[in-house]
Structure formats: structure tokens, C-alpha cells
Image (cartoon, coloured by chain):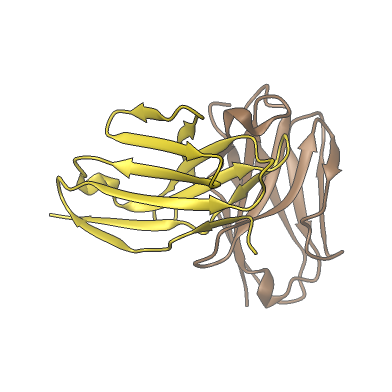
Amino acid sequence: RKEVEQDPGPFNVPEGATVAFNCTYSNSASQSFFWYRQDCRKEPKLLMSVYSSGNEDGRFTAQLNRASQYISLLIRDSKLSDSATYLCVVTTNDYKLSFGAGTTVTVRA
Amino acid sequence: GAGVSQSPSNKVTEKGKDVELRCDPISGHTALYWYRQSLGQGLEFLIYFQGNSAPDKSGLPSDRFSAERTGGSVSTLTIQRTQQEDSAVYLCASSLGSTGYYGYTFGSGTRLTVV
């Protein structure tokens, strides 16, 4: 079983819509959780950290469910510029990040 | 520097040749990582440096791969006798301290094509 699993999508949504997706992780001792964004042929960039209480950054909301071992990302009022691959990232020890294969989101006009 | 710098950005090499990839991390970042990403795949961990030492080399796929870091700064990843399956984007990242808690900053990668 992979350490981090994501629905690859693609999620194809109109501008202004809300889109949400999850990822699951296998190691219950995982400590830190992140969402990264990767544009086509570009490097991953940190979108947001995910805290136990859940957190929001503008139109983006992240949630962590330790009991069920998943994290989620919700994007409200989608913009064309939100089209990207979203990588779920988990630390399984104090330095190494484990990456999911990514969820592709396409926002259409 | 302001960001993580990698060179070359693209490299095409013949099968069997050696290649050297370079990473210049953010100034002051003690931790440095190499990952690779094959087409349509997730990121695969290769090696982690803390300062000049590499506590975790577990991701290096074969003994053809090696990496070093000098002066707690620049790192080079060397692939000897390249094979076609080595074709991928090689990403370097650095982070503050020895924990991934603050996330990583990635360089823009070296796209390696072995022909």
C-alpha cells in the first residue's frame, strides 16, 4: 500500500464552483501534513500546511482527520488560475516528506 | 540566494554516459533533499542531507547514483552509466532546520533525458 494515496481526478469544474478532494495516508504516526501545488512542467510549491484544527487561507480550506487518516482540500469560488495538480504531502519522520501522486483540477471558463 | 537554484535545467545524454546535476539551496537552509519525478508519477525520495552528511540515502535506486554536499551548501547528484529509465525530472529542495515541519522549497528541477 502506498504511504499517501490520492484520487488522480481530473476534477473538471466551472469558474466559481467549489471543488473538494481528499487524500489518505497509511502511517498513523505521521506528524505533519501539507498541500503542495504543481503546475505543468513546474516544481511543486507549498500551498498550505494542514493543522489538526483545520485551517483556511483565503479560498482554500484544509482539514485533517487523524482518526480516519485523511486530509482534505476545499477550493471555493474556483478561478482559472487554480488549474493545477494538488499534491498531498505527509511527513512520516522528522524530515522526509512523502508525496501523493497528485489530484488534477481543471477550472473552465 | 533567494531560491533554490538547479543546473542544468535540461540535460540530454547518451545511454552509458555519466551526468552531474547541481543544486544550490537557499542560504542558511541546513537540510537538502533530492527527489525525482517521472512523467505522470509522484515524487520519489532519493537522498537527504543535514549539513554535509547524508543520514538517509535509502532512496538512491542503484549504486550508479551518488550525491555529495560540500560546505553545507551546494550539492551534486551524479549518475554513472546512465540508463533510459533514469530519464526524469530531478528536483532538489531545501528546508530550514532538520524538520520538514516548515515544508520544503523546491528548485525548478533538471529534466534529464537519456537517449
Whether residue B15 is visible to the viewer of this picture, yes or no, is yes
Above-or-below relation of B96 to A74: above
Q: Nearer the viewer, residue B106 or B102?
A: B102
Q: Nearer the viewer, residue A50 or B2?
A: A50
Horizontally, is A97 left or right of B59 in the view? left
Q: Position of residue B115 (x, y in %)?
A: 63, 78
Residue at the spot x=23%, y=40% of the render? A76
Above-or-below relation of A18 to A53: below
Horizontally, is B30 left or right of A5 in the view? right
Residue at the spot x=58%, y=39% of the render? B5
What color does chain A have in the rendering? yellow
Residue at the spot x=82%, y=54% of the render? B58
Q: Nearer the viewer, residue A72 or B23?
A: A72
Q: Nearer the viewer, residue A91 or B53?
A: A91
Residue at the spot x=29%, y=28% of the render? A58
Whether residue A43 is visible to the viewer of this picture, yes or no, is no
Q: Position of residue B88 (x, y in %)?
A: 60, 64
Horizontally, is A108 left or right of B53 in the view? left
- Note the chain letter of the brown one: B
Which quarter of the rendered picture does the N terminus of chain B lie within? top right
Q: How many marks?
A: 0
Residue placed farthest to the front in the image? A67
Q: Quadrant of residue A57?
A: top left
Q: Position of residue A44 (x, y in %)?
A: 49, 46
Horizontally, is B73 left or right of A42 in the view? right
Q: Position of residue B80 (x, y in %)?
A: 81, 65
